[in-house]
Image (spheres, rainbow, N blue to C red):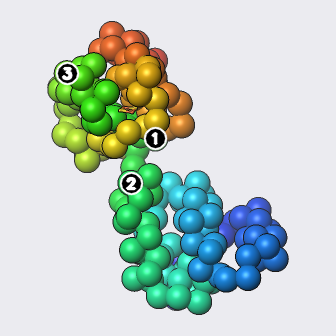
Amino acid sequence: MSGFTFSKENEKYFENLLKRYPEKSSLTLPCLWMAQYQEGWISPEVMEYLANKLETSPMEIYSVASFYTMFNLKPIGTYHIQICKTLSCALRGSEQIKRHLVQKLGINVGQSTKDMRFTLSEVECLGSCGTAPCVCINEDYVQNATTQKLDELLDGLSK
Ligand code: FES
């Protein structure tokens, strides 16, 4: 049996979505979002739960969750720092920002700090190429990011 269940709010939202979509499989993405907001990541228990709920297999849920980089397949820190590595950001110094953050946080890309405060990831285009380089911290964009700007932000978040 799965150790995960939707919160009351998510369950209510799910019930409403069911009325709008005849195919349960169409609910895979919204359900993954709800589960991730609730749990922080898509654990094997979440996949099993969603598979039962959507009458599919955990492998089907996994195949969708692993296709999209915005779904976390392992626990992440309180602050998820995502550095865009695509062309505009690369040309405007994202590599330098990455090296700086790796050194500052003492972790590599794909890792979290021991206190689980920060997780560092590299992602494809964040859709903010005009203000490259772009870094996303949880749901907030840092546009025209510089190492100095990020230092100030992260120092504030460390307190
Ligand atoms: S290339 Fe970085 S936001 Fe588009």
The residue where tag 2 is placed is 69
Q: Which mark is residue 29?
A: none
Indicate the secondary structure of the residue bearing disc 2.
loop
Q: Label 1 is placed on what type of residue?
A: Thr
- In this rendering, is residue 19 above or below 145? below
The residue where tag 3 is placed is 96
Q: Quadrant of residue 145?
A: top left
**Looking at the image, is mark 2 or mark 1 nearer the viewer?**
2
Q: Label 2 is placed on what type of residue?
A: Thr
Please give the name of the residue rendered at 40% of the width and 44% of the height, measured from the top-left corner: 77
Residue 71, percent across and down?
A: 44, 57
In this view, which residue lies farthest toward the top? 148
Residue 158: tell me if it is visible: no
Indicate the secondary structure of the residue bearing disc 3.
helix
The one of 87 and 66 positioned closer to us in this rendering: 87
Please give the name of the residue rendered at 39% of the width and 12% of the height, measured from the top-left corner: 149
Query: What crowding class fits label 3: few (fewer than 14 Cα within 10 Å), some (14-19), or many (20 or more)?
Result: few
Q: How many marks?
A: 3
Q: Quadrant of residue 75?
A: bottom left
Q: Label 3 is placed on what type of residue?
A: Gln
Cα–Cα gap, marks 3 and 2:
22 Å
- In this rendering, is residue 140 above or below 18? above
The one of 159 and 89 positioned closer to us in this rendering: 89
- In terms of sequence position, does the residue under pointer 2 or pointer 1 come before the other? 2
Side (left or right) of 49 relative to 99: right
Cα–Cα gap, marks 3 and 1:
24 Å
Quadrant (top left/top right/bottom left/bottom right) for the C terminus: top left
The residue where tag 1 is placed is 78
- In this rendering, is residue 32 above or below 151? below
